[in-house]
Amino acid sequence: MGDWLNVRGWVGDISFFVSDNTVGMSRFWEYKYAVAGLMTEVLMATIVFATMMLTMLAIPWIERKFIARLMDRRGATTSLRSLWVGEGGHHADWYDNVPFGLGKPIRWLNKFLNEKVGNASDIHSVNRVKDRGYHGIWFLIPGLFQAFADFTKFASKEWIVPAKADRFMFEVAPFIIIASTVMIFAFIPFGPHIWAANSDMSLLFMMAIFGIAPLGVFFAGWASNNKYTLLGGIRSVAQLTAYEIPLLITVLSVAILSGSLNILEIVDFQLTSGTWNIFLLPLGGALFLITMIAEVERIPFDMPEAEAELVEGWWTEYGGMRWGLLFAAEYMRSYAACLLFAIFFLGGWETPFADIFGLLGSNQDLILGGIAIGLIGLAFILRNVLPALAAPLPILFLTILPGLVWMLLKAWLLFTVFVWIRASLHRIRTDQILEFGWRWLLPLSIVNLAIATWLRLFVWNGSEWPLAIPALITAITLVLFIILGIDEDKSQIQGRERPYSIQSDSPASTRTDR
Amino acid sequence: MAEMWISMGPQHPMTHGLWTLKVKVDGETVVDTEPDLGYIHRGVEKICEARDFTKITTYCDRLCYASANTWSHSYIYAAEDLLEVEVPERAEFIRVVAVELQRIASHLMWLGAYCPDVGNLTGMVWCLREREMMMDLLQELGGSRMHYNFPRVGGVKRDLPVGFAMRARAKLALFLDRIQEYEALLDESTIFLVRTQGVGYAKPEEMVNHGVTGPNVRAGGVNYDVRWAHPYSVYDQLDWEVAVERPSIKGADNYDRYRVRVEEMRQSALMTLDALDKMPGGAETHFTEGDEMIISKAPVRAPEGATGFHHFEDSRGESMFYLVGGGDGRGKNPYRCSIRSPMFITLPYASKCMIGYKVADIPSIMGSFDPCIGETDR
């Protein structure tokens, strides 16, 4: 299992080269392997941390752009629909510039959308409500640097501790939260060769670390000596009892299905067994998504924050860079949740349909990657001379993408789901999440565990899944999803007394008794 | 856990204005509440005693920042009662258009503020998006976005602008479609239903005893709308219906109050469309400023001892103005101007409604009564 982006191998080689030529030359030469190993681990930890921080720039960007689109905000937001169809009299045409006509399906979809849901009104003042200028795709890029501007702002702010706060705990709580959050990423692989630590029980260890932050939240809420933060901290702990057990049981079902508590092995299992876990445990995927949203305290489960009644919940009293880091930690947790979903259920870094293409998907190496790049370059040159020859070649582009890219794409896609949920749901109450957790999530997670156990014990034949099983499960899930997703019977709704009603017997204009 | 008092306000996301709600909580449960008002008392009633009748309108505009037009119209009807002015019928139709557009804008502002109260920001942005259309229309009428100063004693400042009717029809048709978007976002969301249904019961008989009016009491099944019960202006010539809920036996909950306002927005939109159709002289024609079709001559001085009174269906309930003429010895000012604010009467009752519910329900209950502190403190 691996691709050509063998970061760990390269770092190991370099470390050994350096160690061999320094320590290996000295009289401590027998320590050169230990020194090389240490160097490798430190460098890998740094690289993984840098990868995480750099790729996380996309997370607040997605949050802002996508939610602005869902909320239909006006203003200087060049948001996704503007990109997609173009607005304000302009029609987007970027898909025409995509090489090899790959943008054509987007154009057809775009045309369809414009006809079906486009704004057909000719009146300018009506149009104005929906009118957002289309400025082009490049105007999306500067939004990425907003994070740096935010960082500068937070870093330049004063750090204030409330006079009557418990100063020690107040200072320690952010460290607990931020440190435990960053530590999660030690165990998350970004690719087959990009990981910082790989212990046998990495799954168990990581879920344990994930659960530390609510403790820090409680400390912060208590130590701030503020009634809002106190209520926020208590809510965080109360919420913990509702989602943590179903979450762990769901993760356990993944471990049972994959037969390992090691994250890399869980991904490798999905690569070799022929299908992703989401097709075997769709219920588990749904449960994991719900409980993870509760774990990272996003809407609809953000009661510890609850800006409507608790001002800003447990972080009301924090300011300056500590607040900024706490907020960054919140997004890191969301990002970790997305990455974990991709790892557990979406096959991690595997290229989608890799085995259908029969291509390099899971065992690329540098030579094949170089050949593919060369072919793509050739196709790009030939596209005007021999279009028929050039057309099928871009498919090779999929094969040379390292696993890192697919991993990130999956995680970012998951995060758009998080944002979508945040934009369309409301905040539920503490007693309601407790009821939801104990009466729905817990039994369902047990059912999910039973399904996973049954699959592993009686269906798994030791090498790969019989194709009928994931197909059957997916089909059943889709049917259930459609049945449950259909609105109640329309005729029943119309026959039923509406939730609201008009009581006056006759319109005011025909009244005679005045 | 010991009981403790939490002071929510004057700067708190829950308050929608400048006031304080002191809440006594036992853990997450609300045990007692105490509203504390008066932060923005400006003495509008006293100021009015030193102003000409024509100049009071601007002060009445500033009574409520979310619903300025209804308050200035409320005053204008009382002043016309005092000065005994006949208003041209076309002006009355224009006033109905202005007031009902303002009512829609005010209810949209309420719904927009209510969605974040239950944790959804999308609803807010969507509602303010449609409110922008209403603001544009009102801006065409009055010239400003917030305080329009539109009505005059005896008529209106100016006629409908050219093309106003066409734009209003198009925007209201779009708005009637957009209401379904709110319903899709709110009514079809289970979380919204569990957050609003069965929360914040207000009994209709208690509301009547406290003097609660407007959408709040109509949510309790009390069919009292001043426009319908005591028709003023030309409301009796228009096709519309009073939005009244049928609440459960326990009284009106948050959901009822939400529903009644959404239905009232729909009725206001239909009423405005109808008023544009039935307008004497035609909605498309434009009369110049001061034309007798839109404003009639009004006396400047009121006789001493004469009184003017009007009760008016404001966006938040029944507002009343009581004017006594003959102030300052010359009759150009009112001797006394008394204002009845619906929210001043509703707020203490609403504060008691939340006893027994959770802390998370405080904004959702309080917000559902649509408090406006500008008019409450006057």
Image (cartoon, coloured by chain):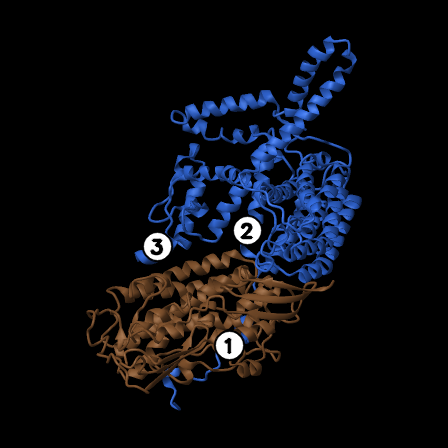
Q: Is residue A431 above or below residue B241?
A: above
Residue B2: % across, % down: 73, 64
C-alpha separation, residue under disc 3 versus residue under disc 2: 25 Å
- Compare residues A470 and A294 and report the one nearer the observer: A294
Residue pointed to by mark 3: A128
Q: Are marks 3 and 1 in contact (CB under 8 Å)?
A: no
Residue A95 in view here:
no
Question: Subunit of mark 1?
Answer: B
Type of amino acid at the residue the image marks with label 3: Arg
Give A509 or A111, whichever is nearer the viewer. Answer: A509
Secondary structure type for disc 2:
helix
**Res. B51 visible in picture:** yes
- Camera-near label (3 vs 1) is 1
Which residue type does callout 1 highlight? Ile
Query: In which quarter of the view is residue B279 placed?
Result: bottom left
Q: Position of residue A151 (x, y in %)?
A: 53, 38
Q: For residue B84, what is the image quadrant?
A: bottom left
Give, as a three-letter code, the residue at label 2. Answer: Trp
Residue at the far bottom in the pictured view: A513
Give the CA distance from mark 1 to mark 2. 40 Å
Where residue A420 is drawn, which disc sits there? 2
Q: Which residue is mark 1?
A: B345
The colour assigned to chain B within the rendered structure: brown
User: Chain A is shown in which shade?
Assistant: blue
* Front position in the image: A98 or B139: B139
Q: Secondary structure at mark 3?
A: helix
Q: Please state, as top left, top right, bottom left or bottom right, where the C terminus of chain B lies in the image.
A: bottom left
Crowd around label 1: few <14 · some 14–19 · many ≥20 (10 Å): some
Disc 3 crowd, CA 10 A, few/some/many (<14, 14-19, 20+): few
Q: State whether discs 3 and 2 lie on one chain.
A: yes
Relative side of B117 to A199, left or right: left
